[in-house]
Image: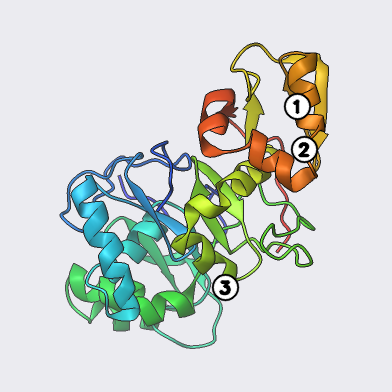
Amino acid sequence: MTRLFHLFLIAAVALSASTASAQDVDLAGVKCPVKGGPAKADVYVNYNYGVVYLCCNKCKAAFTADMAKRSKGEYVTKANHQLALTGQFTQRTCVSGGDEPLNDKITGDVGGVAVMFSSEESKKQFNDAGGLDSKRELAFAYTPFRKHFKRVTSPFFKTGLKCFMMPKKSVRSKYTVCHNGGTVFLCCSKCYRRYIREPDTYAAQCNHQLMITGQFEQKKCPLSGGAADAAHQVEVAGVVVKLGDAATKAKVDAAADDKAKVAMLFSDERFVAAFAKKTKPASADDGK
């Protein structure tokens, strides 16, 4: 069934160091941009501020290498098409050009994505381009995609949240990466590239932010792996963490500062073992 990709109708959805599934998206019928096999939720790469899903680790490696070619990459067009198909990006202007507003009643299907047009004439110009591959190039190649589409705001975005890489700056809704299956927000493209180069370096800060934005909840003591006791809790940069006993709490309290406590409690290994992803966001924030 064709997935409508209308500006006013689409619902917001959310290379990680984790093997956890990425944000909850419907991958029924979604194909790998490399080999065309069924895309899998646990095989994905952070790309273009969204998440691209692949069919296997071999394709993941091929896609990751192709990303270095930027606009000249072999899989750019199909990857951008998938970002639209999975609801991560929404159309903002007519792909046939012109300044007229989009008309959500004038659409054309491009591989499952209902692309909108400003008029019947602009739709005709687009359709005259030829078959699916030609239409996909016109709408989803590197330059037109950057011009005509924008990132959908995650329901977990929080206005005023500070970037852990540049603490004086607030995060923006468009600069996102997927980490441990959650959406992490950054302030700029520079910080995005820093994460892509060194995801392990920022793992603890990412996991801490996933708690700040309410995407995960605690299940166990992250240090002992045992039951978490509210009688022995600490607050770490805005996140309350329940520990197993007084001795464990004393160990955390002895850490030099919040930065050291974040590193101690929110490493990927401890986060995956002691915290779990929530099924739904508590609330949405439409800040930009």
Q: Position of residue 16 (x, y in %)?
A: 43, 49
Q: Position of residue 143 (x, y in %)?
A: 39, 82
Tell me the quadrant of the picture where the N terminus can be found: top left
The answer to whether mark 3 and mark 2 are in CB contact below 8 A is no
For badge 1, the amino acid type reads Lys
Q: Residue at x 66, y 62 (%)?
A: 165
Residue 41 vertical position relative to residue 147 in the rendered view, above or below? above
Q: Is residue 32 left or right of residue 148?
A: left
Separation of residues labelled 1 and 3 (CA atoms):
35 Å
Disc sitting over residue 190 in the figure? 3
Callout 1 crowding tier (Cα within 10 Å): few <14, some 14–19, many ≥20: few
Q: Quadrant of the C terminus?
A: bottom right
> Where 249 sits versus 92, above or below?
above
261 relative position to 112: left or right: right
* Labels 1 & 3 near each other (Cβ < 8 A): no
Q: Count every numbered label the image shows and give the total.
A: 3
Mark number displayed over residue 255:
2
Q: Nearer the viewer, residue 233 or 33?
A: 233
- Residue under pointer 1: 251
Q: Is residue 13 visible to the viewer in this orientation of the structure?
A: yes
Secondary element at tag 3: helix
Q: Hey, what amino acid is under mark 2?
A: Ala
Q: Is residue 5 visible?
A: no
Answer yes or no: do the residues labelled 2 and 1 have beta carbons within 8 Å?
Answer: yes
Q: At 52% across and 60% down in the image, what residue appears?
A: 195
